[in-house]
Image: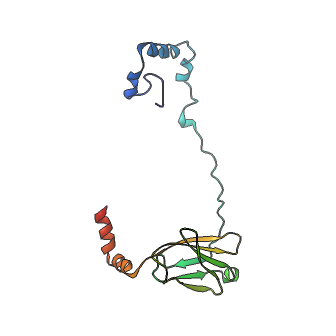
Amino acid sequence: MFMNFVDFTDDACMNMFTQGQESEMRSIFATGNPGNSFLNSSVCDSSLAAGGPLPEDTNTVDVSLAVYPNPFINQVIISSNDPVNDLGKTKRLFDLSGRVLRVQILQSQKTTVNISNFTSGIYILKVEGGSTPLVFKLGKINRLIQQNWLSGVLPEMILNIL
């Protein structure tokens, strides 16, 4: 129950008080009694509420790397918009259990990562070396899933399941 003001709510809870409880509450809010001022108070008036200031944007990370395609079949390309700052950063590829699968230093503006020998699933790519590490979630799919998705068969199958 969110209110206990006898019949101030218009629902099934109105009948859960005894006649004595109802009389007691009505007497508290009667004219001249202490609860009466509550009925005319503007303290709980939401129309007087003012909005507070919005928080400042603390996300100042400039993402200079692009990772594509996602989802992928055999390889992922890491492309840098800022090679001066991105070259030399360390790329780590993790599975969902947190196991490191591959570590590599970015040595060119465009790096291809061959992941053809991994099973389909979700992988985490973490690029470190700057002030803030960049983390990307990648999905590996097999060629059959991609062909079905592009032909519209897979989305139609999913919609039929739902």
The quadrant in which residue 46 appears is top right
**In the shown orientation, is residue 18 left or right of residue 108?**
left
Question: Between 47 and 63, which is closer to the camera in this rendering?
Answer: 63
The quadrant in which residue 37 appears is top right
Residue 108 point in image, percent of width and height: 64, 87
- Does residue 34 lie above or below 68 as drawn? above
Residue 159 point in image, percent of width and height: 31, 65
The residue that appears at 43% across and 77% down in the rendered structure is 141
The residue that appears at 53% across and 36% down in the rendered structure is 47
**In the shown orientation, is residue 18 left or right of residue 151?**
right
Question: Between 148 and 62, which is closer to the camera in this rendering?
Answer: 148
The residue that appears at 40% across and 24% down in the rendered structure is 14
The residue that appears at 58% across and 16% down in the rendered structure is 34
**In the shown orientation, is residue 15 left or right of residue 44?**
left
Question: Between 99 and 13, which is closer to the camera in this rendering?
Answer: 99
Report the number of discs. Answer: 0
Residue 103 point in image, percent of width and height: 63, 80
The quadrant in which residue 105 appears is bottom right
- Which residue ends up furthest to the bottom in the rendered image? 108
- Please, which colouring scheme is shown? rainbow
**In the shown orientation, is residue 121 left or right of residue 129?**
left
Where, quadrant-wise, is the C terminus in this rendering? bottom left
